[in-house]
Image (tube, rainbow, N blue to C red):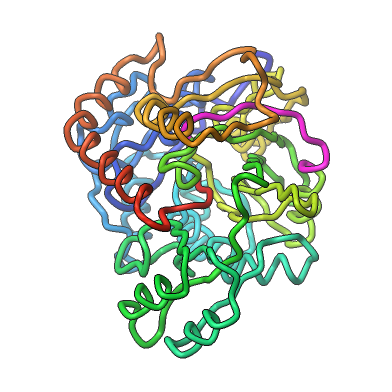
Amino acid sequence: MPFEADPDVPGLVVKFGDYPLHHGGVGAIRSLGRAGVPMYAVTEDPYTPAAASRYLRRAFVWPTSGTEDAGRLVEGLLRIARRIGRPAVLVPTDEEAAVLIAEHRGALAGPFLFPPVEPGLPRRLASKQGLHELCVEHGVPSPAAAFPGSYDEIAAFAETARFPVVVKNREAFVRRSRPAVHGTTRVATRAGLLSLARDWGERPGVILQEYLPREQAEDWIVHAYFDRDSTPLALFTGVKVRSWPPHAGMTANAYVVDNPELADLAARFVKQIGFTGIADLDLRFDRRDGRYKLLDFNPRVGAQFRLFESEAGVDVVRAMHLDLTGRRVPEGEQRAGHRYVVENIDLPAWLAYRRSGYTTPHAPARASGTELAWLAGDDPMPFLTMLARFVRPGARHLYQLWRTSRRGGGPSGTGA
């Protein structure tokens, strides 16, 4: 490996909520563990794929819902810090963890190492409304959007809107409590929108967004790590080939594709807003006007980050650890043409995309190499644990998502 990580500074993968089949956390454990970094992780129970990794020194079993009082979560992290016994680099894999770390950095600094991001910025970036406002402020293209405050405002919007429209929860955190919609949802008609809206209460927490038709669009992703001056020390671009549910949600298959225009757009936006740390961006290229439109800015590690690695062996998690421990992040080109596959969801996604006839023009005809989300020859247990936990409930969940995608409207959008 052409760089040397500091073996005296461990890493702690942090997430809140009950979703044990998370390949991004497994990827972070393997990435730093292979570089000689002692790894720890917060897990729901002792039998998650992350807890089974040979590169994990210890799993801190801590069941959470993601809706706990912030003070309780901070105290829980500090208890873990005392058990580790030395400062550790925090690796957040969900918005709840990223926001908590930023907003309580005074209490967490010292026991932990993390980028000095402005405390209120991750929450604003995780919010659909906050991100849209930042895009407008800095001249970054994004889909047209409305943020209704009542049912009457939704009805007024429906009178003039061009359907279909996309409905999303305004704030990322409501997915843990009472979401208005389950994931990104495409609504085909005015009547359909008004019918859905009747269940949203007096203060609907939704964003109504312009629909970018998949026949005229391409889904792109950017993963990067930015230092305290918002300078990219690692920045990668790729194209999403398939996701699950189809054309929505989690990446199932993606390729590394060089895109200097997209890299420049992301770097300029991050510099303008002053973000520091790991970022996972989803953008949709609209062929109708030739612009990349920013859909999501995840201020944390993206689940598919292991797609991206430089010729120097650096990914965004390694870049962060090197930077926070005072070591130089070596430069290197990204591995163009490399492919990423999430085994448990790519097969149903492939079947759905084959049925629809949709293809991604920028996907290479042949991969230069493949990174699997779960299966690794040097660390097989996470894959086997995933299979054991996935087969029955996972098959039922995939079937439910398939039925949702086939109903009128169905989901649409992007996600991590």
On the picture, is 315 further left or further right than 70?
right
Residue in view at x 46 percent, y 20 percent: 372
Up/down of 252 relative to 104, above or below? above
Residue 324, quarter of the rendered image: top right
Residue 254, quarter of the rendered image: top right
Up/down of 282 relative to 11, above or below? below
Residue at the top extreme, as displayed = 377
Q: Residue 346: image x %, image y %?
A: 42, 28
Residue 243, magenta (yes or no):
no
Residue in view at x 75 percent, y 52 percent: 288
Residue in view at x 67 percent, y 55 percent: 294
On the picture, is 98 further left or further right than 68?
right
Q: Residue 129: image x %, image y %?
A: 57, 71
Residue 258, magenta (yes or no):
yes
Up/down of 54 relative to 149, above or below? above
Q: Residue 234: image x %, image y %?
A: 71, 35
Q: Residue 137: image x %, image y %?
A: 76, 71
Up/down of 56 relative to 276, above or below? above
Boundaries of the magenta span: 252-263
Residue 390, quarter of the rendered image: top left
